[in-house]
Amino acid sequence: MRRYRIFRTEGALFCAAGTSPTGFAVGLAAAIVLSGAFFGCTTVSEMLKATENPTARISSARFSGLDAESISVTFDVEITNPYPVSLPLLGLDYRLSSAGTPFLTGAAKDTGAILPGDKKIVPVMAKIPFLATLALLEDVRPGNVVPYTASFTINARAPGLGVVHLPLETDGEFPIPVPPRVGVSSLDWESLSLTNAVAVLNIEVTNGNDFPLSMTRLAVDLALAKASIATTTIEEPHSFGAGEGRVLPVRLSLRPGQLGMAVFRMLSQSSVSYDLAGDISFSTGFGALSLPISSSGTTPMSRLGSP
């Protein structure tokens, strides 16, 4: 003979099947029948609603904390409790994979409980480290946009059934950014004397990423032939498509006499070695980012208006 335990919740009596029910529907149906037949419960219609299962969905996914090493994505998991009693949540496990290869796993604890007939949003933050991800995903390179599948298992203790596991999946993509390539394409002198020199420094910026970016600031220190020449900043916004490059002219004014005769003679040559160091800031569809830049090379120099 099957044994049943009788529980009281929020003023209503209901019964749950014994320690090993064959299924949630059987156990709950027995509870409803016993509640109505033996106790004359007035909440049978309410209990029928409990034949529905809890449901879950991803209400949003948002990025934060984008830097040179990682990016974080927060998934808002909305869970609905159809029962006339509270639904205790026992935690949530997640796994991120790309093209079938897992690269990140984690869990959310202390998820609380959901009130009867209510819903709750559980935020789940996953921090994606770029170096570890690149090591696991062999076909992914810096600058790529990586497609991913996020798989969730929501663990809850349902009335009449015990522990249940709700699976949930969503797809998305995230970037692994590389700094834009920055160099000097030319240095054109408008005037050059010991007392005053005015030049146009042509800085070439190339976006090496598979996604567009909008540059918001570029600050660089310029050295020519290892001599520090100038510090300059570009704060006008410039947009770059994936793989796109362009030249940004910057006007410089300096006093060569203060740098010494050796530097002045060097500035009179047709080419010179340069070093650039600084940082670049830009916005993307995945968040704002600031990265250090540095480059060295040789650039041609010319006098504007010279034949």
Image (cartoon, helix red, strand yellow):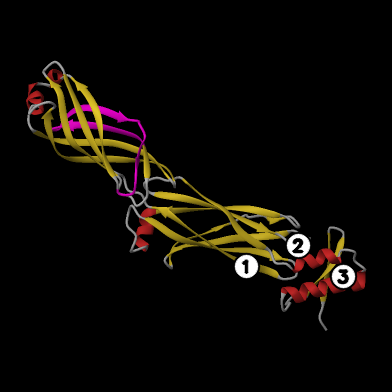
Q: Are marks 1 and 3 in contact (CB under 8 Å)?
A: no
Q: Secondary structure at mark 1?
A: strand
Q: Earlier in the sequence, mark 1 or mark 2?
A: 2
- Report which residue position mark 1 lands on: 165
> Type of residue at label 1?
His
Tell me where residue 10 appears, x and y as whole percent.
84, 58
Q: Secondary structure at mark 2?
A: loop
Q: CA distance from mark 1 to mark 3?
A: 27 Å
Q: Is residue 86 above or below residue 290?
A: below
Q: Earlier in the sequence, mark 1 or mark 3?
A: 3
> Type of residue at label 2?
Tyr
Residue 101 falls within the magenta-colored stretch: no
Q: Is residue 183 above or below residue 266?
A: below
Q: Is residue 67 left or right of residue 55?
A: left
Residue at 28% x, 35% y is 278
Q: CA distance from mark 2 to mark 3?
A: 16 Å
- Report which residue position mark 2 lands on: 83
> Type of residue at label 3?
Ser
Residue at 38% x, 49% y is 69
Residue at 83% x, 84% y is 1
Q: Secondary structure at mark 3?
A: helix
Question: Which mark is on residue 35?
Answer: 3
* First to last magenta residue range: 216-243
